[in-house]
Image (cartoon, helix red, strand yellow):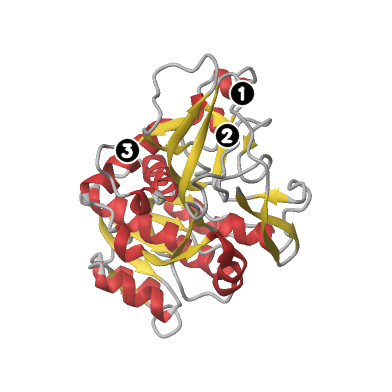
Amino acid sequence: MRAARYTGPKSIETADVTAVKPGPGEVQLAVAYTGICGTDLHIYHGDMDARVRRPAVIGHECSATIAAIGEGVAGWSVGDSVTVLPVHSCGSCAACQAGFGHVCPQLVFLGIDAAGAMQNRWNVPAQLLVRLPSGVDLRHAALVEPTAVAVHDVRRANLQPGQHVVVVGGGPVGTLIAVVARAAGADVSLVEVDHERRSLAAKLGFRVLDPTVSDVTAAIVELTSSRGADVAFEVSGSAGGVTTAVDVLGVRGKLVMVAIHTQPREVNLHRFFWRELEMVGARLYERRDFEEAAALIASGVVPAEELISAVVPLDAASDAFASLSSGGVMKVLVDCTEAAEGSNDA
C-alpha cells in the first residue's frame, strides 16, 4: 500500500509500506479522503519535530470505510462508513475522570503522536470510530473533524440565538465557526485579510470586514447600535487578531481563544476589567461534537462542497503541502483510495 510520510522540514514523501492486520480491539480502515489542516502544515514546516517521529504518516481529518475487523471488536461491520476521533486519552488522570479526556495531559493525537490517515489502509482502535450518517458523501465527510472543532468552539461560547458574533480569521476553521454560529441563531461578522477567503465568506452569505481598509471596531459598534459584540472568536493566531477580538466586545462579552498562539500576546486587561469581559479556551473536541458535526454536514448546513478547494491524489501530497503553505486556499483533500485495491496484506 502507499502512504504519505513526513520525513523532515518541508519534505513529504509518498512511499510503499506494508499493511498489517488489525490487532485486538482495532479495525482496519480503507481511507477515502484526508484533509490537510493547519496542524499538518506546522508539522510540514518542522515546528512539531519534538513530537513527531520521522518518517511519520500524518493527517487526522478523514473519511473511510471499514476494510477489516480485529479480534474482540463488536458493533461494526466491513463496509461501514466512518470517521475517526483522533484523540486517545489515558482514561485515568484527573481530566479524564472529570469527563474531559480531550485535554488529557497524556493525550495521544493520531497523525501527530501516532500514525495518521494519509495512507491507503489505517489501523485504529475501534473505540475511536464515529459512524457517518447514511448516504453522506465521503469527500464531504472528510470535513467532520474541522467542523467538530467549530462545534466545540461554539459550545464553549454558550452562544445564544440573536447574539452578535465576530469571527476573527476566515480560514477553514473560522469559516466553519461562522457557519455553526449562524446555524445556532447568531448574527455573524467575519474579519479576514485574504481577498479569496473574504470572497468565499461573502458568497456564503456572511458580513465580511477587511481590517486592512476599515476600522473593524467602529464597524461593529455601528452594527450593534453601540452595544458591541457578545462573542468574539480569535482564529487568526496573530497579535492583531487578539487586539481586534478584544476591542469589538461589549459589556460582559466573551472572548473564545481558538487559534494556537505559539508565543505570549499582549492583552488589554484594562478592557477586561472595565467591561467585565470573559475569556475561555477552546481546544479540540468531544465525541458529541463529532456526532453533531457529522449531522450538520449530512444535512447540508455545512457547505462542504464550497469549502473544498481541491482534491489531489496521494502521490501528489507533497505538492499539495507546498501550495497550501503559500496561502489563499481553503481545504485541500488528499484522495487516499488510489491503488488501495489489491494492496492489502491483511
Q: Position of residue 202 (x, y in %)?
A: 28, 73
Q: Label 3 near label 1: C-beta < 8 Å?
A: no
Residue at image coords 56%, 20%: 25
**Would residue 228 appear left or right of 117 to someone viewing this image?**
left
Identify whether 312 is placed above or below 119. Answer: below
Crowd tier of the residue under label 2, counting other residues whose Cα lies within 10 Å: few below 14, some 14–19, many 20 or above: many
Q: CA distance from mark 2 to mark 1?
A: 8 Å
The answer to which of marks 3 and 2 sits earlier in the sequence is: 2
**Would residue 45 appear left or right of 91 to someone viewing this image?**
right
Residue 123 got which mark? 2
Identify whether 315 is placed above or below 154. Answer: below
Q: CA distance from mark 3 to mark 2?
A: 24 Å
Asked whether residue 265 appears in the rendered view, the answer is: no
Crowd tier of the residue under label 1, counting other residues whose Cα lies within 10 Å: few below 14, some 14–19, many 20 or above: some
Q: Label 2 near label 3: C-beta < 8 Å?
A: no
Q: Position of residue 26 (x, y in %)?
A: 55, 25
Asked whether residue 226 appears in the rendered view, the answer is: yes
Quarter assignment of residue 4: bottom right
Quarter assignment of residue 5: bottom right
Residue 4 got which mark? none
The answer to which of marks 2 and 1 sits earlier in the sequence is: 1
- Hey, what amino acid is under mark 2? Asn
- Hey, what amino acid is under mark 3? Glu
Q: CA distance from mark 1 to mark 3?
A: 29 Å
Report the residue marked by disc 1: 23
Identify whether 200 is placed above or below 269. Answer: below
Q: Label 1 near label 2: C-beta < 8 Å?
A: yes
Report the residue marked by disc 3: 292
Q: Position of residue 110 (x, y in %)?
A: 60, 40
